[in-house]
Image: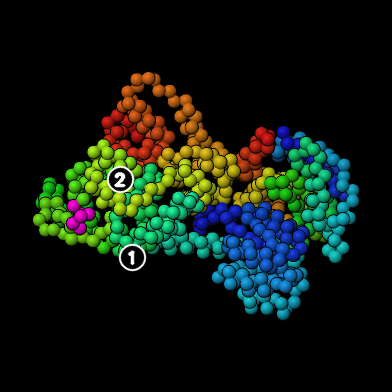
Amino acid sequence: MSFVPEGKVYMKSQWAILVVDDEDIMRDSMAAWLREDGYTVLTASTGREALELARQRDFALYFVDLKMPGGIDGIQTMVELKKIHPDPVVVIVTAYATVDTAIMAMKQGAYEYIVKPCNPEEISLLVERVIKVKNLQRENLILKKKLSRKYNFQDIISKNTRMQEIFQLVREVSSLRSTVLIQGESGTGKELIARAIHFSGDRCDKPFVCVSCGALAETLLESELFGHEKGSFTGAVGQKKGKFELAHEGTIFLDEIGDISTKLQMDLLRVLQERSFFRVGGSDEIQVDARVIAATNRDLLQAVAEGTFRDDLFYRLNVINIHIPPLRERREDIPLLTRNFIEEISHQIGKEIEDISEGALKILIDYDWPGNVRELENAIERAIVTSRTRALLDDAFSFLTNGKKEKKGLIIPPGMCLEELEREAITVTMQRTSGNVKEAAALLGIDRSTLYDKIKKYNLGR
Amino acid sequence: MIKVCVVPVGPLQTERLDDAERFVRMVFGFPTERLSPLPDAAFAYDEHRSQYSSSLILKELAQSLPPGVGRLVGITEYDIFIPMLKFVFGQAQLGGTTALISLARLRQEFYGMPPDEELMTIRLRKVVVHELGHTFGLTHCSDARCVMILSTNLEQLDAKLDAFCESCELILRDRVSKYDQE
């Protein structure tokens, strides 16, 4: 097993190399040799073909033969490549070295000029050097993005048509003031969409304030949202600004909105209508300009029908509705998300994982993901931590298939009390997540505070 | 169970073929079989370089894969190359069926030194295991001791062990078990 103490090692197969040569045997043997190193290698027999491929994707490195028929030689190919990608790493290869061509190639911006045949270690070192720089450049970009704490659409990975429609809607509504209601199962990325709306709109340089409504008791949540005056309740030793005030001119994201009490529903409705509120224990009306984005994993329309959620508040919140599909309805995203998580997590924990087997990927694609993207991320982290290989194999995800078998074998005796069933579901899920409440809550489709209450209620040890 | 056939390419000492078969049985546990030699590799000879094209021989070997044979390993005394490189110790189809190994540059004599049979045998074992590993889809490993690390010169070849690291071993077992299921 190899551990990487410094820098980030991306999956080699994610780096693509293009070999451009008109001679079949030269091109194919070079490609095969580079593939043995784990890289994705594509080939082109002419400069034009190379440019066509470069238009479709970027390559970490281009090996381009100097002399090629078809009206466009290696140097011209390189010049044209620069018009497609800003800084392509091009290595000009030739069997007929002259000082003039070498100077010309370097002047036109070739990264290296090599004469074939060359020593295997020369090529090996060259590729290693380029990929090392590429790794650093990529890591730098990611770190910059993380530092700036900006969230844009690149952070949300999806090829799914419904998700693409959501991205389009996000673009359209990002600069409006209208309230947005995001619905979707736990772990589908509701907060990411909320952040994307805020950070791609004209409030992007103002605060984005996040409140998890389900995590706090009613009185605490009231104080959290609206703030309080000194002495307004026991423990209120000083004046405190609420989240609405902190989100002034920015966005307030109210997560798990479906779990708030009737009183708070009324208070919230007032803020949405009047754009003002009072601090707890206060008498001064405070004006606020905060865009409200709310999210829930509950069916709010049903809650309205059942009378547990105010219909007037629902319609105030539901001006723009975004419904995020669960991961099982966008399985085409699983390979892309998986590779992204492998890169991120293996870097975070400093363990080199280069690939994932086809079988393992199939397990992930076939699994139903009740906890959605968050569960996928947790599953990959668990697989990376326990993996003894540099590729994640099928057995790294056996805990998913074992769970499936357990599910099939579940026998519910007629008349079993619902509380017993709930207790059993929580016990099994907590065992599966090794006591991780956050993960278990996502799997069970309830919020963390509810799960804590139930753990306490059934006297279940973690 | 995968059967591995060993094919001499051009004139070759029988002992070397025996060694190669023994390594396959020891390291991989596969049964082996000796096939009749590929007597003439003139089609792959490059006069300009005075070497044999590894790619052309590999292609020829792959086309002659007998039915029921899982892997074919060609062994030759010829010095082999791919056009981009001055030489290769061996070449394999990544995730394919065929590999070719050259003994020429594994010999001390090639570098003007006295023969060393023991060293030659150790080197042969490493190259056989490495190239056969590629046919099971194993790419180069970053573990300096693993047989699957890339060796572009004899110093690197001599420095690594002749066995898989734990990671490559597990991947290999996974691939072999899938082959057996097919």
Q: Give the magenta range.
A: A270-275
Query: How far separated are the C-alphas under marks 2 and 1?
Result: 25 Å
Residue lying at 72% horizontally and 46% vertically, measured from the top left: B96
- Residue A415 appears in the picture as rendered: yes
In the image, is residue A52 above or below residue B148?
below
Of B129 and A173, the residue lying toward us: A173
| Label 2 sits on residue | A256
Residue lying at 48% horizontally and 32% vertically, measured from the top left: A404
Queried whether the magenta region covers residue A273, the answer comes back as: yes
Of A88 and A52, the residue lying toward us: A52
Residue lying at 33% horizontally and 32% vertically, measured from the top left: A461
> Residue B2: x percent and y percent?
73, 36
Queried whether the magenta region covers residue A239, the answer comes back as: no
> Residue A215: x percent and y percent?
27, 44
Tag 2 and tag 1, C-beta contact below 8 Å: no
> Residue A48: x percent and y percent?
67, 67
**Main SS class of the magenta portion in the image:** helix
What scheme was used to colour the molecule? rainbow
Which residue appears farthest toward the bottom when viewing the image? A100
Marker disc for residue A202: 1
Query: Which element type, helix, strand or loop, lies under badge 2?
Result: loop
> Residue B64: x percent and y percent?
82, 44
Q: How packed is label 2: few (under 14 Cα within 10 Å), some, or many (20 or more)?
A: many
Picture quarter containing residue A178?
bottom left
Q: How packed is label 1: few (under 14 Cα within 10 Å), some, or many (20 or more)?
A: some
In the image, is residue A54 above or below residue A278?
below
Indicate the chain on which mark 2 is placed.
A
The residue type indicated by label 2 comes to Glu
The residue type indicated by label 1 comes to Asp
